């Protein structure tokens, strides 16, 4: 099977006022279509940089990033991006926020209305169509942002710590919903997180990075079934063993910052 996303000896160096800063170095990684891949590692090790290169927001300094066999274009419209900040428009209600990408592509008004209704049902927001972001809880805002992300049906979801600001209960709820949606819609997912529990709970594969410049320490294959019960994972011996394995892999980076 041909990989959907490929990083081939990727190096990315940024120019700063203090001089050049190398974010990632020698990254080789393949992501297959339909996989949920989590990226973990110390702050500043280039995890978000890989998402940005997949989206075509900037290109590698050397090496190549390919999407479906071709170099990533300047803007990769086959991907959708969600960050920690939901970026909901405060002057638009929930339905209006979700409709934004559909309006941009010029979908007829009736089709927009129908698609927004389906998306709101998918993320559990039916009944809040006319609510404004300021009236929503943190979890509901994340659901609205996720619905907007899915609105134009990108085949790959790029998620940069989207649930980091949520409390433990809301985070678990959103993890469950995201995993269900990704499986149901057969999405490919690249998910950046600092939370090792989250990385193991969601992933088919976990990519562990060193400190900056980020290099891949190991790609860990999940030992969990593809269809998994996130509510009961903490009682799983396999889950706890894999989380402990990640801590061991990241231990050298933790020692570096002491």
Image (cartoon, grey):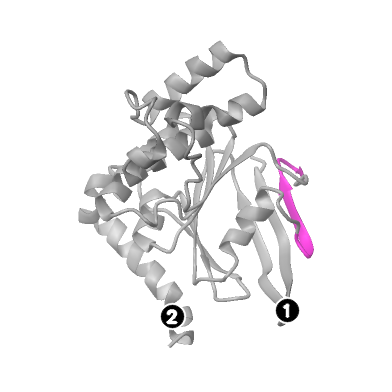
Is 63 within the magenta? yes
Farthest-out residue, bottom: 258
| Label 1 element class | loop
> Distance of mark 1 from mark 2, alpha carbons?
27 Å
Specify few, some or many for label 2: CA neighbours under 10 Å numbering under 14, 14-19, or 20 or more.
some
In this picture, which residue range is highlighted in magenta? 60-70
Give residue 46's quadrant in the image. Answer: bottom right
Q: In this view, does 13 lie to the left or right of 115?
A: right
Residue at point 43%, 31% (across, down): 94
Specify few, some or many for label 1: CA neighbours under 10 Å numbering under 14, 14-19, or 20 or more.
few
Residue 176 visible in the picture? no
Between 50 and 166, the residue placed more toward the observer is 166
Residue at point 38%, 53% (across, down): 223
Q: In this view, does 227 lie to the left or right of 234?
A: right
Q: Check disc 2 and report the residue beneath it.
A: 254
Asked if 212 appears above or below 78 in the picture, the reply is below
Q: Check disc 1 and report the residue beneath it.
A: 17
Residue at point 78%, 65% (across, down): 61
Farthest-out residue, top: 110
């Amino acid at each position: 099977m041909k990989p959907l996303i490929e990083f081939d000896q990727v190096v990315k160096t940024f120019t700063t006022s203090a001089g050049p800063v190398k974010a990632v170095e020698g990254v080789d990684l393949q992501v297959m279509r339909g996989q949920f891949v989590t990226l973990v590692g110390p702050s500043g090790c280039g995890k978000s940089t890989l998402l940005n290169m997949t989206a075509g927001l900037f290109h590698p300094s050397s090496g190549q990033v390919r999407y479906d066999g071709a170099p990533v274009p300047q803007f990769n419209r086959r991907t959708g991006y969600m960050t920690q900040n939901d970026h909901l428009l405060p002057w638009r209600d929930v339905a209006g926020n979700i409709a934004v990408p559909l309006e941009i592509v010029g979908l007829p008004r009736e089709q927009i209305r129908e698609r927004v209704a389906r998306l709101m049902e998918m993320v559990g927001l039916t009944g809040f169509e006319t609510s404004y972001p300021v009236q929503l809880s943190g979890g509901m805002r994340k659901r609205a942002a996720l619905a907007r992300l899915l609105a134009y049906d990108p085949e790959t979801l790029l998620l940069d710590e989207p649930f980091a600001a949520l409390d433990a209960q809301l985070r678990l709820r959103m993890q469950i919903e995201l995993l269900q949606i990704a499986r149901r819609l057969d999405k490919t997912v690249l998910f950046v997180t600092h939370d090792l529990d989250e990385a193991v709970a969601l992933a088919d594969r976990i990519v562990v990075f060193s400190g900056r410049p980020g290099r891949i320490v190991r790609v860990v294959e999940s030992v969990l079934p593809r269809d998994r019960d996130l509510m009961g994972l903490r009682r799983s011996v396999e889950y706890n063993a894999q989380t402990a394995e990640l801590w061991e892999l990241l231990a050298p980076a933790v020692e570096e910052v002491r």
